[in-house]
Image: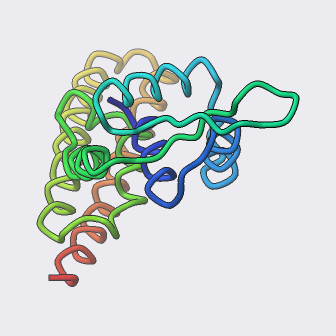
Amino acid sequence: MSYVDVLILRHLAQSPAHGYQLRKHVEADTGFVLHNNSLYPALRRMEEAGAVVKTAQMQQKRPPRHVYEITDVGREMLHEMLAELPPEIAGDQAEFLCRLAHFALLEPSERLGVLDARDAAVLARMAHLRSLDEGARDDQWGSLVTQELIRRCESERSWLQEMRMLAKADT
């Protein structure tokens, strides 16, 4: 599951919606363009997992509209996805920011776990960038780019520390 699944379940947790409505709500709230080829397979997976239920809503002179509603299983799934940031996706900025945007739904200790996972991913990226920089000393422009990326990682680590303080203040 990915941040797309988080966005879908989060919007369904607020109210049931049909596909087009759901797509437009996600796009309006996040700026993320949710294509039908991402939306409907995700909804199908969630329906098979018991996270959502689909009901047909009859329309005059049109095919039935399918309305999706989150289940208790879906609410649990949403919480688990928000509270966990596995190492293999902790380096993905969209995955991290999606979770951070929904920190209000998490306990302070869960927030700290997500922040720690991201910090570990940023540290690993910095170590990789530093090794690249050591090898690029003869390439001025490559080195400048690598140094800028390292600076951005350092800046993010400072920001993560601020987020950690906010998360601790909520305890």
Residue 22 x %, y %: 62, 43
Residue 39 in the figure: left or right of residue 25: left
Q: Residue at x 38, y 29 (%)?
A: 47
Locate residue 80 relative to residue 32 in the image: left or right: left
Q: Which quadrant of the figure has residue 23?
A: top right
Position of residue 43 measured from the top left corner of the image (x, y, whole percent) = 47, 29
Q: Within the image, what quadrant is residue 109 found in?
A: bottom left
Residue at the (17%, 71%) spot, across then down: 108
Colour theme = rainbow
| Left or right: 66, with 133 as reference point | right
Q: Nearer the viewer, residue 117 or 148?
A: 117
Q: Quadrant of residue 67?
A: top right
Q: Residue at x 60, y 47 (%)?
A: 17
Q: Residue furthest right?
A: 61
**Residue 103's x, y, as percent?**
33, 64
Considering only vertical position in the picture, is 159 above or below 67?
below
Residue displayed at 21% across by 84% down: 169
Residue situated in front as seen by the camera: 170 or 19: 19
Position of residue 132 measured from the top left corner of the image (x, y, whole percent): 29, 20
Given residues 90 and 143, the one toward you in this image is 90
